[in-house]
Amino acid sequence: MASDSTKILKVFYCYAHRDKVWRDALERHLEPMRRLHQIITWYDRHIEAGVEWKKEIEAHLNTSNIILILVSHNFLYSDYCYGIEMQRALERHKAGEARVIPIILRPAEWKETPLGELQALPTNGKPITSWRNRDEAFQDIAREIHNVVRTLLAQPQNRSGSALPFSIKSLTLRVLYPDIAEEWDPLENTLTPDNIDATSEQTVWWRCIANSSHKWQATISSRVEGYRCPVCTKKSVTDVMIPFGNGLRHERQSQGWSIYQVAERLEVPTNTLAGWEKGDFMPTPMMLRRICVLYGKTPKELGWPEE
């Protein structure tokens, strides 16, 4: 049975921060479902500065249709993950309000916990790290999650207590692409990222997060496909990426921090941080903001491109 194409499910990631690299990898394998407007995903890095994080997590946990619990020794060790998030997730699962799916990252004694009563992924609960080809493990997980998504979308939505799928009409730019929404120009546009469709072909004004004097017009859909500030992207590697990378490395060294320590604070792989410092690639706008908060510097002070 075909799913209702006007509805979309909300997927919540319950995981330990030390396992963020695994969450990110899983997100990439679930990307086709997001592009098909079958799911939206949420995890705690979407919380904006100044928001009371426990209430924000609880609100999203209580309104999600599918809850993915990323199981490892890190997760089982975390009092918050195991004692609060997981317990609430299982309550909603038992009440028929949400579907909880354990994702086994590494070998751990999870079968002796309440999670042992649930059907885990990958197939037979074999940990991802035990697969010779980890892409096959993630493909196995994504395939089974997609089956669950199709089943839930095909079900009648009048069951008492169950979380309802979202209408696609409610999926604004702010909801789906908060990074891009940060570059929305509030002075030039009459609309806001909160009331415009993320798939719109409308041309609007944008303001570069790195330099507010960089303003340009582009369709919303082109931004979603990866089109960025034309001023910054026209600059050469030497003009843009190398100075910024040097600034990051200088700031880290002046703090006496190792690459590992900074990567842990930013919750990114060490090779990603090393790539920024070498000038191989640039961070996203949201990650740039986190870097600035960590170092207590403005983008300009870190060498971010300016006119």
Image (spheres, rainbow, N blue to C red):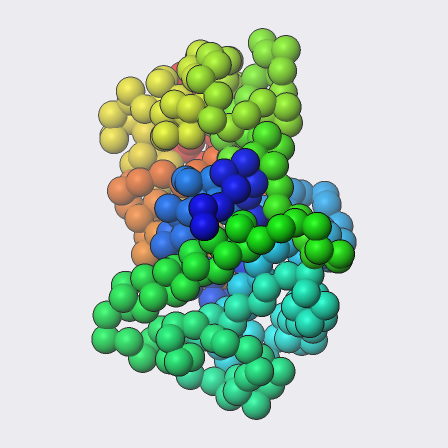
Q: Quadrant of residue 6?
A: top right
Q: Quadrant of residue 135?
A: bottom left
- Across and down, in percent, residue 142 comes to 39, 59
- Across and down, in percent, residue 52 comes to 75, 50
The residue at the point 64 percent across, 75 percent down is 82
Please give left or right for residue 142 compared with residue 109 in the image.
left
Position of residue 8 relative to residue 147, above or below, is above
Please give left or right for residue 105 compared with residue 69 in the image.
left
- Whether residue 157 appears in this view of the structure is yes
- Across and down, in percent, residue 117 comes to 57, 82
Position of residue 238 relative to residue 263, above or below, is above
- Across and down, in percent, residue 113 comes to 60, 85
Q: Quadrant of the C terminus?
A: top left
The residue at the point 57 percent across, 90 percent down is 112
The residue at the point 50 percent across, 76 percent down is 119
Please give left or right for residue 106 compared with residue 47 in the image.
left
Q: Judge by depth and name the residue closer to the eye, 4 or 45.
A: 4
